[in-house]
Amino acid sequence: MRLSQILFSQGFGSRRLCAGLIHHGEVKIHGDVVDDPDADFDPQGLQFEVSGKTWPYHEKALVMLHKPAGYECSQKPRHHPSVMSLLPAPLRERGVQPVGRLDEDTTGLLLLTDDGTLIHKLTSPKHHVPKVYEAHCKHPVDAEQLERLLAGVELHEHELKVHREPELVKALAAEAMGTHGVRLTLAEGKYHQVKRMMAAVSNRVERLHRPQFGDLVLPADLPQGQWCWVAGPEAILGAPGGA
């Protein structure tokens, strides 16, 4: 693949801008400046430098962000900055999107990708990709609440104007964390689901964090507001043939 096409595919601007970066000596491969936009390289496994920063080639971008509180998972935020502002320009340019959403006040693991097929697989209820949430609650969490969360609770749909049969939503796993904490594993991704489930058992979520999505665990050394590459869908879904 031509070097200018590689840069273009990785989000470094228009084809003309990418060619200009190369002409001006801003691009290095294996430590050497390459100033020919038509120079041909095998992109698979390629690492290159643009303006002194190293970038790996990825046919599809897949990253995780340690989302801080105070950011919206939206391209067009209403009240707070977008999580997209925490990503470098090339990732924004190539059109990565959040995989599902975390509320503005929720922290933790947020996936972003430009792979539409993967987004569907990770968010579709039929694939049952589990997500783990850790909530600190206003009131103590007791055994009865955990049993109800596992058995299934009814989420009130105040916003609906038509009648529908009550739907029970169950946690795949529920365990107490200290006196006021709960760790829930969910396969669905309903609106405000953790908060509504805890409200259904007469409790209230005061802080919410997501440390895990599928098999992927948020690294302990990834600070809030920082991002890193994910090796591939298998890091989330496990070996082929899994979720």
Image (cartoon, rainbow, N blue to C red):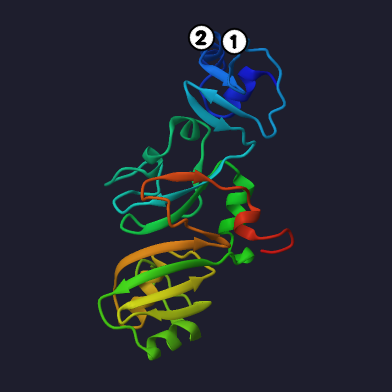
Q: Say whether residue 101 is visible.
A: no
Q: Which residue is mark 2?
A: 24
| Residue 137 located left or right of residue 14 | left
Q: Position of residue 193 (x, y in %)?
A: 42, 68
Amino acid type of the residue tagged 1 in the rendering: Asp
Relative depth, front residue between 30 and 203: 30
Q: How far across and down, in percent of the image, does residue 173 sit?
A: 51, 78
Query: Could you tell me if the residues under marks 2 and 1 are in contact, i.e. CB atoms within 8 Å?
Result: yes
Whole-percent x and y of residue 16? Answer: 54, 13
Labelled disc at residue 35: 1
Residue 198 left/right relative to 138? right
Measuring 36% from the left and 66% from the top, which residue is drawn there?
A: 159
Task: Tell me residue 146's x, y (percent).
Answer: 42, 85
- Does residue 46 appear in this view? yes
- Outermost residue toward the bottom in this view: 144
**Residue lying at the far right of the rendered structure:** 241
Q: Residue at x 55, y 18 (%)?
A: 27
- Compared with residue 96, is residue 157 higher up or lower down, i.e. above or below? below
Q: How much space separates mark 2 and mark 1, taking CA atoms?
A: 7 Å
Amino acid bearing label 2: His
